[in-house]
Amino acid sequence: MRQRGLLFPSPVVMLSIIAVAMAAIAFVATRGGEPTERKVSIVADASPSAPATPEAPETLRKDPKPEPPPVDRAKVYVEVYNNSGISGLAGRVATSATDAGWMVVGSDNWYGTIPATTVYHPPRLARAAKLLALDLGIQRTAPAVGAMRLDRLTVVLTGELG
């Protein structure tokens, strides 16, 4: 005797398919846009009619945060990639970074779409990324994405530096 019927995939397979579809939608929806940042400044009310605020008692005052230690360029790994058609650009910029004291560990070509020359960084190296960008004259920094290593800064060049 032969039995006929429908075979439904397991719930794990269905959830996996849904998760992959959601990840693809999220990827398509978030790619290509640069993060927008705003500078927020606080304006104090200096009008003469404003009552003076009493100073907080000593027990309520918070100590200011200590200054973070300065970035030691020689201890930060840097990779430089060329995403332009300019031959030797990554090598020249790698030499400039080395001359500024950074530990450049490699340079190569980058294959992908990058909107502008950028210094990519893991969260713990955000200050170092800003300093490297200043040293090289790069205007844009961003968090590391995709397959970028999280123990170093990644410079992706889209053209000559100014």
Image (tube, helix red, strand yellow):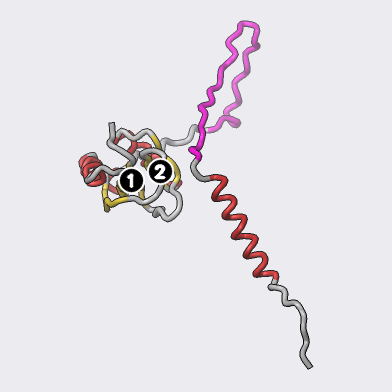
Observer-nearest residue: 154 or 28? 28
Identify the residue shown where x is 32% and y is 42%: 157
Q: Which mark is residue 114?
A: 2
Residue 144: % across, % down? 43, 48
Q: As drawn, is 158 to the left or to the right of 38?
A: left
What residue span does the magenta drawing correspond to? 33-62
**Vertical comparison of 77 with 12: above or below:** above
Q: What secondary structure is marked by label 1?
A: loop
Q: Which mark is residue 83?
A: 1
Is 119 within the magenta?
A: no
User: How many neighbours does mark 1 have within 10 angstroms: few (below 14), some (14-19), or many (20 or more)?
Assistant: many
Q: Earlier in the sequence, mark 1 or mark 2?
A: 1
Identify the residue shown where x is 34% and y is 50%: 110
Identify the residue shown where x is 60% and y is 24%: 56
Q: Quadrant of the N terminus?
A: bottom right
Q: What amino acid does circle 2 point to?
A: Ile
Alpha carbon distance from label 1 to label 2: 8 Å
Observer-nearest residue: 33 or 139? 33
Do callouts 1 and 2 mark residues in contact (Cβ within 8 Å)?
yes
Observer-nearest residue: 93 or 26? 26
Residue 20: % across, % down? 59, 60
Identify the residue shown where x is 69% and y is 73%: 10
Residue 126: % across, % down? 42, 42
Is 60 within the magenta?
A: yes
Q: What amino acid does circle 1 point to?
A: Asn
